Amino acid sequence: MNAHVLGPFRAALVAVEGHWTWYRRNWRATVISNFLQPVLFLLAMGVGFGSQVQAGEATGGHPYVVFLAPALLVITAVQNAVFEATWAVFSAFKWQRSYLAVVSTPITPAHVLYGQLLWIALRLAAGTAVFLGIAVALGAITSPSAVLAVPFAVLAGMAFTAPVVAFTATREKPDSFNAIFRFLVMPMTLFTGGFFPLSQLPDWLHPLAWVTPVWHGIELARGVTFGTLRLLPAAGHVAYLAALVVLGIVLGRRYFHRRLAV
């Protein structure tokens, strides 16, 4: 059976099955980073620090923990994606060389990319859904419409992940991965309106926040949770995030083919 007969969707599912086979045996190693850490962060910042913050104009009239929870949903998705888009992908190229084994079958380098991105999206969906459930139990989420924030958080996470996966495919050493977290993920976490309104930052920083997928994701998640999301702004946010995903896929196809084609 050749790759064309196999089909891209079926091939991607085969790749996902391989990831799932590994994960169901090793899931305990990711519980803290994927599930427990975001909840502890919500408790520390939302409940602990938030008890000292009065509801007002800065929080849209909501208690701080309620203001923070939708943003943490997006931030959690992006942070959870970092390892999968960097170290895990690099290992599959360089250390374990599992991608090389996969492309010796009818699965092509493009199929490997699709499977990797689909697997990351499923991981993000599971992680954000669990976080949402816990946030509801803690009283940090009070609107049923917040369930729609999950796909928005996943989209924001993939808008960051897809280009980073493509970048990882060009690396021969993992030296730059810590810089991604330090100079991209941390600023996106702290300065994109998640913990305080963007209006409280200097005006010259606003355009830097606007180009990040986290800001767009937070606007979507908060908007749908608090019922303030409007059609045209929502369409703009979604279009921008989707464009980043497409860009990552286009670049990823090129770099995966260059790295894996035999």
Image (tube, helix red, strand yellow):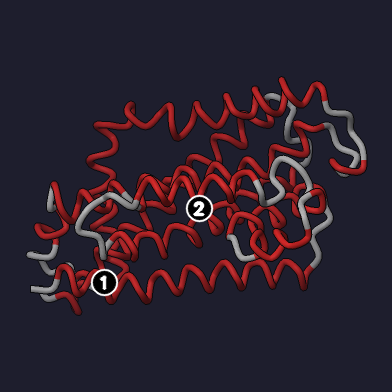
Q: Looking at the figure, which quarter contains the N terminus?
A: bottom left
Which sits in the foreground, 203 or 217?
Answer: 203
Q: Is residue 80 left or right of residue 53?
A: left
Residue type indicated by callout 2? Leu
Element carrying mark 1: helix
Task: Work out how far the residue at label 2 is from the one at label 1, CA to CA, in angstroms.
Answer: 22 Å
Residue at image position (77%, 35%) is: 66
On the image, the x and y values in percent for residue 249 come to: 38, 71
Q: Up-down: is 174 above or below 30?
A: below
Which numbered disc covers residue 17?
Answer: none
Q: Picture quarter containing residue 166? A: bottom left
For the C terminus, the image quarter is bottom left
Closest to the camera, between mark 2 and mark 1, is 2
Residue drawn at the location 32% of the way across and 68% of the way down: 9
Residue placed most toward the observer, 95 or 151:
95
Question: Residue 68's x, y, as percent?
Answer: 72, 38
**109 sits to left or right of 148:** left
Can you give x and y, in whole percent of width and height, for residue 211 in the image? 61, 65
Task: Say which residue appears at 50% left-offset and 53% top-offset.
Answer: 184
- The crowd level at tag 1 (other Cα within 10 Å; few <14, some 14-19, many 20+) is many
The answer to whether marks 2 and 1 mark residues whose Cβ atoms lie closer than 8 Å is: no
On screen, residue 6 versus residue 54, left or right, reads left
Q: Earlier in the sequence, mark 2 or mark 1?
A: 2
In terms of image quadrants, where is residue 73? top right
**Residue occupied by mark 1:** 255
**In the rendered image, the vertical position of residue 7 relative to residue 35, given as above or below:** below
Vertical comparison of 173 with 244: above or below: above
The residue identified by callout 2 is: 184
Callout 1 amino acid: Tyr
> At numbered mark 2, what does the secondary structure look like: helix, strand or loop?
helix
